[in-house]
Image (cartoon, rainbow, N blue to C red):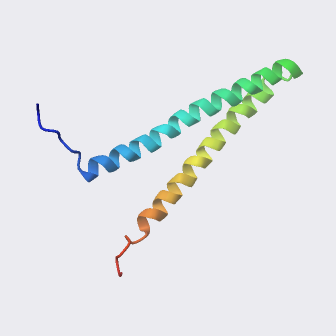
Amino acid sequence: MPPRLRPDRETLGFMEAYGRYASFGLQLVVTMCLLGWGGWWLDGKLGTYPLLMILGLFAGAGGSFYALVKTLEADTARRREPPHGDPS
């Protein structure tokens, strides 16, 4: 049986960040699709095509970008904090 390799801290940190930010891409696509579809459906019911579909797409994109910015701000603030137990 080959020896089991353990990833180092740098690799684990990269994988964690990759997973976190890759999920934002998926969130962006899913949110835009759902809100765009909902707007398209309402446009069909109300006869306002394409107004609500466009508003849904922009709302989905805006909400996803807002969540991304908030996460990036929190990550930046966390990285600026000194580690626990550091007297400086």
Instruction: Determine whether, in the image, residue 60 is placed left or right of residue 76.
Output: right
Dividing the image into 4 quarters, which one contains the C terminus?
bottom left
Work out whether residue 63 or residue 17 is closer to the camera in this orientation and state it.
17
Say if residue 53 shows up in the picture.
Answer: yes
Q: How many marks?
A: 0
Give me the residue at 71% from left, 23% from top.
Answer: 37
Dividing the image into 4 quarters, which one contains the N terminus?
top left
| Residue 13, above or below 5 | below
Give me the residue at 21% from left, 44% from top.
Answer: 6
Q: Where is residue 65? Give x, y as percent.
A: 59, 44
Say if residue 47 shows up in the picture.
Answer: no
Q: Where is residue 5? Give x, y as percent.
A: 17, 41
| Residue 8, above or below 50 | below
Instruction: Determine whether, in the image, residue 8 is placed left or right of residue 50.
Output: left
Give me the residue at 45% from left, 38% from top.
Answer: 22
Q: Where is residue 78? Give x, y as percent.
A: 46, 63
* Residue reaching furthest to the right: 46
* Residue reaching furthest to the front: 1
The answer to which image quadrant residue 33 occupies is: top right
Instruction: Determine whether, in the image, residue 87 is placed left or right of residue 75.
Output: left
| Residue 81, above or below 56 | below
Q: Where is residue 45? Give x, y as percent.
A: 86, 19
Work out whether residue 8 or residue 70 is closer to the camera in this orientation and state it.
8
Give me the residue at 82% from left, 24% from top.
Answer: 42
